Image (cartoon, helix red, strand yellow):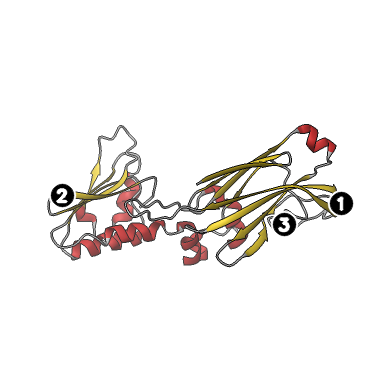
Amino acid sequence: MRKKGSRNGLTALAVAGTNVVVLGWDMSENDIRNRGILGFAIQRTRHEDDERIWLPGMKTFQSVDPNPDPGVPLSSFRHPLQTFQWSDYSPSPGKKYTYKIVAMSGQPGALVEDADLSLTVTTERIDQGRHAIFFNRGAIASQEYARRFQNLPPDEVGQPAYDWLSRGLVEGLETFLSQAGQGDELYGAIFEFENKRIFAAIKAARDRGAKIKILYDGDSQREDNEEALKNSGIAGLTKARTRSGQYAHNKFFVLRKAGTFVEVWTGSTRS
C-alpha cells in the first residue's frame, strides 16, 4: 500500500509492505532555513489498540546527550531525525497504522512542533490466499540483532535468535512441505542445503508416502551440502547438480498432486 500527502510545506510518501513501512518526505530549503527546522520526528499510532510511540533513532544533539549508550534507540521527538527518509521495521502484517511526520524547530532540549503531516496505511498480509510472501531478517536488521542478542552468533543464543531471524519464513516452508502426502510428488532444487528443520519436514513428507526428488548445488557448495546431508535421513532423496555453470543458485520446491502441479515455493531462501 502507498499513501502520499502534502500539508503546510511538508510532502511525504509512505510505502507499506508486510513487516516494514518506508517513509520519505521533503520540505523546501527556504522553509527549513526560515522556520529553523532542526530535524523530523515520527509518531506511529497502531489502530487496533491506539498505541502511540515516537519512532527511535540513534543520533543525538551533543548539547542534550553528549555520550549516548552505543546502539540504544532514542526517541525522535527529543532527538529528531537528520534525514528525509526513515523505515519502521516493527509493524505486524495486516495491521492499520498512522504515521505523523513532524518538523521540529526551536532549540535542542526545547524543541517545538512545526509543520506535521499524517499518513495512514495498512500493512500487507503475508498470506493473500493465492500467494504468500515471507521476509526473513538479514543484514538490514544487523544493528537490531546486535542490540537484542549482544551480537552473539545465533548458535550461541539459541532458538530465540533463529526465530527472530526467520520471522515466519522457515515455518512457512515447513507448512508448504507438510502438504505432501501419500501419492503426492515433491520436486526441489536447492543451493545451500543445511537446515535441519527442513530436513525433518522433508523426511516427514517421505514417511507420509510422498515421492521426493531434490537437486542440490554440486559445484560451488557441494562439500558443504554433502556434509550437511550426512545423517539427515534424506540423503537418498537428493542428487548433486553438477552442470550448473558453477553456481546453481536455485531455491524452489514444486508440489504435484494427482498428476497436476498445484503449488510452488520459491525465492532467495536457504534451506
Label disc, if present, on residue 74 of the rendered structure: 3
Q: Quick one: label 2, few (<14), some, or many (20+) residues within 10 Å?
A: few
Q: Is residue 39 above or below residue 34?
A: below
Q: Is residue 91 visible?
A: no
At label 3, which amino acid type do we have?
Leu
Q: Which residue is mark 2?
A: 260
Identified at 29% across, 63% down, the residue is 200
Q: Residue 218 appears at what percent x and percent y? A: 28, 42
Camera-nearest residue between 147 and 97: 97
- The picture quadrant where one finds residue 82 is top right
For the residue labelled by badge 1, is the local secondary structure a helix, a strand or a loop?
loop
The number of numbered badges drawn on the structure is 3
Q: Residue at x 40, y 56 (%)?
A: 169
Label 2's element? Answer: strand
Q: Residue at x 61, y 45 (%)?
A: 23
* Residue 226, above or below 246: below
Residue at far front of view: 7
| Mark 3 or 2, nearer chain start | 3
Q: CA distance from mark 1 to mark 2?
A: 67 Å
Task: Tell me the mark number nearer the camera, choosing from 3 and 2.
Answer: 2
Residue 159 lies left or right of residue 129; in this view the side is right
Residue 25 appears in view: yes
- Under tag 3, what secondary structure? strand
Q: Classify mark 3: residues with Cα within 10 Å, few (<14), some (14-19) or many (20+).
A: some
Residue at label 1?
A: 63
- Amino acid under disc 2: Thr
| Sequence-wise first label, 1 or 2 | 1
Across and down, in percent, residue 34 comes to: 84, 36
Mark 3–mark 1 Cα distance, whole angstroms, equals: 15 Å
Task: Name the kind of residue labelled 1 in the image.
Answer: Ser
